[in-house]
Image (cartoon, grey):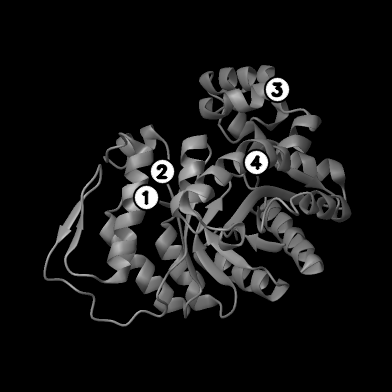
Amino acid sequence: MRLDVQPWGESLAELLSAARDAEAAGAGVAWAPELHRSAPVVAAALATATSRVGVGTGIALAFARSAMLTALSAADLDELSGGRFRLGLGTGVGRLNRDWHGVAFDQPVARLRDTVAIVRAVLAGGDPLVHSGVRSISVHGWRRPYPPVRPNIPIYLAAVGPRLVRLAGEVADGWLSHEICPPAALRTRIWPALAVGLDRSGRERRAFDVVAAACCSVSADAFEARRRAANVVGFYASVRSYADMFAAGGFGAVTAAASAALRSGRPADALGDLVPDDMIDAYAIAGTPSFCASRISDFSGLADAVKLSPPSYGLAADEVRDAQKSLLELVGSMS
């Protein structure tokens, strides 16, 4: 099973240094998220700072850019990385699309399906480029004049709900997990939907890359490891979209308390004191190196890779640095 990383840095220079350390540790792919930075820009920096590790957007917002610009960025990033790039796309939520980026969010499943189709058409380089749907394109007399590094660039879809997960299995080359997706959820919720999508596509399982994800807090002091991870779980406990999932796990009272604290003015990344140890254990990997290695191995047979990220919510930069150092040491010991 491949170990991927989502490197952290207070500056781009520090982030790239972490990526080089991850490459030296044997990580499979370095993924660039999109929230406080631009995923394609960070992916470009990762591509130039490394030479062997895969590079991916994990994830780029699918609707905030035109599908054609997304495709062109993917082609450029594949060239820049020497064929190491993976295009990870996700829908985001409605408020983020409408209020932050001023773009439509109606029919997100159909819109994402159209996005993948348009990206693939642009990368294939045909003329004309025509696709009609919720998202459409009509381009005549244009052809990219640069030879591609590879005939196909892998496309991954991040998905949580069953309809989007099925879509990933049907039209993508891989699926990217949310950070809160323990092995039990992967087994009972994700794989049944992925299997339906793969069956629709007529592809075999081996043609599809399943990437689980987890916040991984590693320390010789198990209490300290849990403390660092607590704010990550607390943040997601305050998000309405995950309330049903946490309630099904028996943590409905925690989500209610986290939501109330958020409404009262508590910062979203400072809710860890509301999260009990058993909830941290359920939704994060936090503990000693041997404990974390065992928890990562629980994904074997369910995922092809696990994307690991250090805890960062509500922590001082030096704490995140120490957590990332311990995480990369663990990756090195397991690679």
What residue did someone put label 2 on? 91
Which residue type does callout 3 highlight? Phe
Would residue 47 be found to the left or right of residue 177 on screen? left
Residue extending farthest left: 141
**Image quarter hosting the C terminus:** bottom right
Residue sitting nearer the eye, 223 or 256: 256
CA neighbours of label 1 inside 10 A, class few (<14), some (14 to 19), many (20+): many
What residue did someone put label 1 on? 62
CA neighbours of label 4 inside 10 A, class few (<14), some (14 to 19), many (20+): many
Q: Residue at x 51, y 42 (%)?
A: 165
**Image quarter hosting the N terminus:** bottom right
Which residue type does callout 4 highlight? Cys
Q: Earlier in the sequence, mark 4 or mark 2?
A: 2
Instruction: Label 3, secondary structure: give it.
Output: loop
Q: Earlier in the sequence, mark 2 or mark 1?
A: 1
How far across and down, in percent of the image, does residue 314 sit?
62, 41
Q: Earlier in the sequence, mark 1 or mark 3?
A: 1
Instruction: Label 1, secondary structure: give it.
Output: loop
What residue did someone put label 3 on? 251
What residue did someone put label 4 on? 181
Whether pointer 2 and pointer 1 mark residues with C-beta atoms closer than 8 Å, the reply is: yes
* Residue 245 higher or lower than 145, as above or below: above
Spatial CA span between label 3 and label 2:
27 Å
* Residue 77 higher or lower than 137, as above or below: below
Instruction: Label 4, secondary structure: give it.
Output: loop
Instruction: Label 2, secondary structure: give it.
Output: loop
Spatial CA span between label 4 and label 2:
17 Å
Spatial CA span between label 4 and label 1:
21 Å
Q: Earlier in the sequence, mark 3 or mark 2?
A: 2
Q: Earlier in the sequence, mark 3 or mark 4?
A: 4
CA neighbours of label 2 inside 10 A, class few (<14), some (14 to 19), many (20+): many
